[in-house]
Amino acid sequence: MRVAIIGSGPAAVACTMALMRRGVQVTMLDVGDELDTRTQLIVNRMRGQTAQDWTDADIAEITRNPTIGNRPIPRRLAFGSDYIYGIDQDHAPIIQQGVSIAPTYARGGYSKVWGASMMPVHQDDIGDWPILRNSLDPYYRRVLDGFPYSARNDNLSDEFPVFATSPDPLPMPPQIKAFSADLDGIAREQKGDIILHGQSRLAVRARDEGQESGCVHCGLCLSGCVKGAIYSTNVDLDRLIKLRQLDYRRNHHVESVMDLEDGAEIRCLGPDGVTREIHRFDKVFVAAGAVNSTRILMTSRNLFDQTLLLRHSPKFVLPFLRWQSTPIEWPNVNTLTGLLLELRLRGVSPHWMHAQISVINDMVLKNLKAYANDNWTLRGRLAQPFLRRLMVAWCGLHSNEADPIKLTLRKSASKGTAVLQISATTDTRLNKTIKRAAWRMTRHGLTFRALFLAPFRVIGTTGDGNHNGGTLPMRNNPQHPNETDLLGRPKDWTNVHFVDASILPSIPATTLALTIMANASRIGDTVNLES
């Protein structure tokens, strides 16, 4: 059987693995953009050195980020490069209106630049899905089998199981450990609200394993992991390609797919960027990311000048101060999220609110102009009493609390191809919900010796965090051209399956990657390969 996967991100790799376990040979079609050669040489050089030998010039080069100070929430870059954001693509032009949503054509998708947080979904947050959470449980376990996973069983585990058999948790930074101890003393229920906390669940290798490096606690996590301890699907891609188990074809931009009675057809731009190619397969699995997969479906079904709705988990940042001063270990610290808060706030949302707690990091310090050239600035030294108490909560809400983003595909004679318009509306309801949530956190924080600074909350641009999907929602009985069945097949289609976040009917506040991978694995594992 000839099977194709479109894309190379988490959903693509999880589905590929599931199919390979069934003995299927997979061809992966991908654009596969990569970091520029000059920056990659710097990264390679630093990877071969100890952190103590890194030069100020190399560190400055891979941590540059012009979005700091120019956006409500800075955009995460890959070693100083924004190549992962597919905004200026001649073959797939987009127009952004009030949104931060961007497709990616990077090899490895958004796993090349992410916070590495991996949480399962809660049943209460997927009541509108046609599957139950327990149907994903075996696939959570399968995805995490042999996976680099920093986690521990704690008081999050009853509601959000760890699923991994041998998680290997990173050591907590002092500020995180002290704050966790403060939280240990509070009751689960607070005046009708529920507050749970636990160590972050991260796709990070905590220690060296063979030739693979573990975390070296260098403080540069938000700019990219030089040592490769933060998981990226490129690790699995490289291994499968080296073993000749995967036929990976780069520089293939898929424009449309066609479901046929005896298979499926893919139409794409070939490696030269000009010639259009047609490829036939028995089965096609589309995992190009929510925005790209939606574009492919809209093009394939001629859904021009029609609007599909993209659900998203809205984000905001809430700084806070702890009563207790804790020594700062910057930069010798892992700056990914260190602690998770899961909250059910009565009267704010019926769904879980998700908060990732972080110590100060290079983005914060650069924004405050407190640290430069491997030294504290005068401002940074004067601000030490403040910085020893400062922490940041990066918060998310369920997609039901926000108006969806609109995707409209329009033909354009001037561009020579269709233009995807991505637009948001003014969401006053959301702003009020975030305000209530921030002030509720301020009230609760006093019980565990933390002052959440609700007046200083920062609301992200619509789409920040790239936790989005739902344009092609799974239904028990699809009724519309953009609806899919439980195996990700659009209405009346048989041999084309969409397997990424585009088919999730709603978007929980908890992080998406693990659930996307589990659902893609479920589809790859259960699809009928005989028809």
Image (cartoon, rainbow, N blue to C red):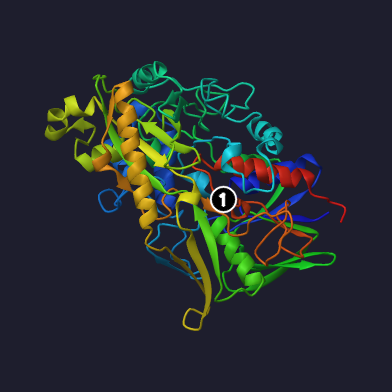
Which amino acid does the dot numbered 1 rest on?
A: Ser
Quadrant of the image containing the C terminus: bottom right
* Residue 75 seen in the figure: no
- The residue drawn where x is 68% and y is 33% is 137
- The residue drawn where x is 36% and y is 45% is 434
Residue 327's place in the image compared with 493, above or below, is: above
Residue 305 at x, y percent in the picture = 54, 76
- The residue drawn where x is 52% and y is 28% is 205
Q: How many marks?
A: 1
Circle 1 residue = 506
Task: Residue lying at the far right in this picture: please name it.
Answer: 530
Residue 39 at x, y percent in the picture = 40, 48
Work out whether residue 18 or residue 161 is closer to the camera in this orientation and state it. 161
Residue 171 at x, y percent in the picture = 44, 20
Which quarter of the figure has residue 498?
A: bottom right
* Residue 398 seen in the figure: yes
Q: Sort mark 1 into few (<14), some (14-19) or many (20+) by Cα contacts within 10 Å.
A: many
Residue 185's place in the image compared with 45, above or below, is: above
